[in-house]
Image: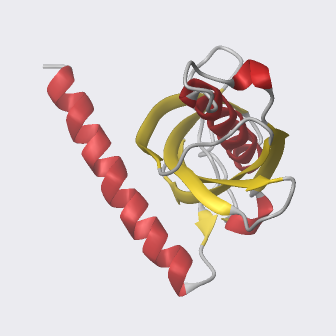
Amino acid sequence: MSPPVPLAPVPISASRASVVRLMVPTDANFVGNVFGGQILSEVDRVAYITATRHARSNCVTASFDRVDFIQPVHVGEVVDFDAQLTYVGHTSMEIWVTVRSEALAGGEPRLVGEAFVTMVAVDPAGRPVPVPPLALETAEERQRFAEGQHRMEQRQKTRQRANR
């Protein structure tokens, strides 16, 4: 059997995804703001889109890392979930999702949250499959990649400790 053909590097811009959603009363928590779980659900969806675009394969969520709710989101606001790859390993990808909210009646968009989501590309049987490497084009992308690699190493150490 011949060795697998290496996958060609793909730029970060090729898989970037953005989802815009109006927050409605059914999204509200007991305080009247948007329920954090609703925000997390949308973060997971946009991360899935980005990962799947990059991998050209189905993907599953492996972890949520460093989720920050910076400000509350209010019912009636429009929320933009923007996702881009920061790091790619052999079968896993780290996606950085920023969450911005704005009132429809006016006002500047404001950063209300961000998260790092790890997705793993899988075949139809659910086994991990290789993903293309990233084509890093800017100093900022290289810096985010290095930071993502460090976070991935930390997650791997946590998993190793848990499996002892």
Give the colour scheme of this rendering: secondary structure
Q: Nearer the viewer, residue 102 or 98?
A: 102
Name above or below for residue 22 compared with residue 37: below
Name above or below for residue 119 compared with residue 30: below
Q: Name the residue located 74 percent from the left edge and 58 percent from the top edge.
A: 16
Work out which residue is located at the far right of the displayed protein and give it.
105
Tell me the quarter of the picture where residue 41 sits. Answer: top right
Expressed as whole percent of the image width and height from the top left, the position of residue 1 reads 62, 36
Expressed as whole percent of the image width and height from the top left, the position of residue 110 reads 64, 62
Work out which residue is located at the far bottom of the displayed protein and give it.
139
Tell me the quarter of the picture where residue 65 sits. Answer: top left
Residue 14 horizontal side relative to residue 145, left or right: right
Q: Nearer the viewer, residue 10 or 75?
A: 75
Q: Nearer the viewer, residue 135 or 113?
A: 113
Q: Quadrant of the C terminus?
A: top left
Residue 11, visible in the rendered structure: no
Q: How many marks?
A: 0
Q: Name the residue located 29 percent from the left edge and 49 percent from the top edge.
A: 153
Name above or below for residue 94 compared with residue 33: below
Q: Name the residue located 56 percent from the left edge and 34 percent from the top edge.
A: 120
Residue 26, visible in the rendered structure: yes
Expressed as whole percent of the image width and height from the top left, the position of residue 4 reads 63, 46
Residue 83 horizontal side relative to residue 162, left or right: right
Expressed as whole percent of the image width and height from the top left, the position of residue 131 reads 62, 47
Q: Nearer the viewer, residue 151 or 116?
A: 116
